[in-house]
Amino acid sequence: SLLDEKDYNQVLANVSKYLKKNNVEKKYIIYIPSWQKISLYKLHKLKIYNKHPQVIQLNNLKNNVKKIAKKNNFQFIDIDDYFFELNDPMKVFHYGLNTHFNRKGNEVLASAVLDQLKELK
């Protein structure tokens, strides 16, 4: 497991209390795919993406985060698929390497989050 579930639950519970104390009603967790997941994008076309051991591990992490987010009344926003809709998802990173998102990556991220927030209304 890539996540200490007890610790993560405690963190979200504390954040939830803090937000409630400050009258914040809507709480979101935005799950951004890692470079590792995006770098395996070619496996989608071969229909073997979800069988890759690293993807299985990362999807388990995502599912655990989602479960704990819901337990603490956070809306879970998953934007994995937005990156896989691109012809070359690696172009969202500087030089296609394991770095921060570049301008295109940040645009995809912002657009994906906005789309998901609109769907939640």
Image (tube, rainbow, N blue to C red):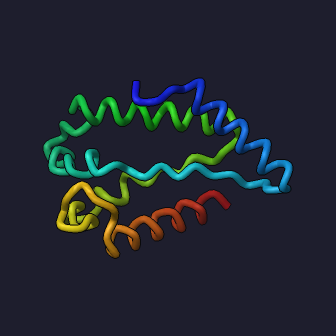
The vertical placement of 4 against 23, above or below, is above
**Residue displayed at 79% across by 42% down:** 17
Name the one closer to the observer, 25 or 119.
25
The vertical placement of 48 against 79, above or below, is above
Q: How many marks?
A: 0
**Residue displayed at 66% across by 39% down:** 12
**Residue displayed at 15% across by 50% down:** 42
Q: Judge from the rendering whether residue 74 lies leftward or rightward of residue 35; answer left or right.
A: right
Residue 79 pos. (x, y %): 43, 54
Q: Judge from the rendering whether residue 84 lies leftward or rightward of residue 6; answer left or right.
A: left
Name the one closer to the observer, 40 or 10.
10
**Residue displayed at 28% across by 51% down:** 35
Residue 40 pos. (x, y %): 20, 46
Image quadrant occupied by the N terminus: top left
Image quadrant occupied by the C terminus: bottom right
Which image quarter: residue 83? bottom left
Residue 47 pos. (x, y %): 19, 40
Name the one closer to the observer, 73 or 13.
13
Residue 32 pos. (x, y %): 43, 52
Q: Judge from the rendering whether residue 92 lies leftward or rightward of residue 118; answer left or right.
A: left
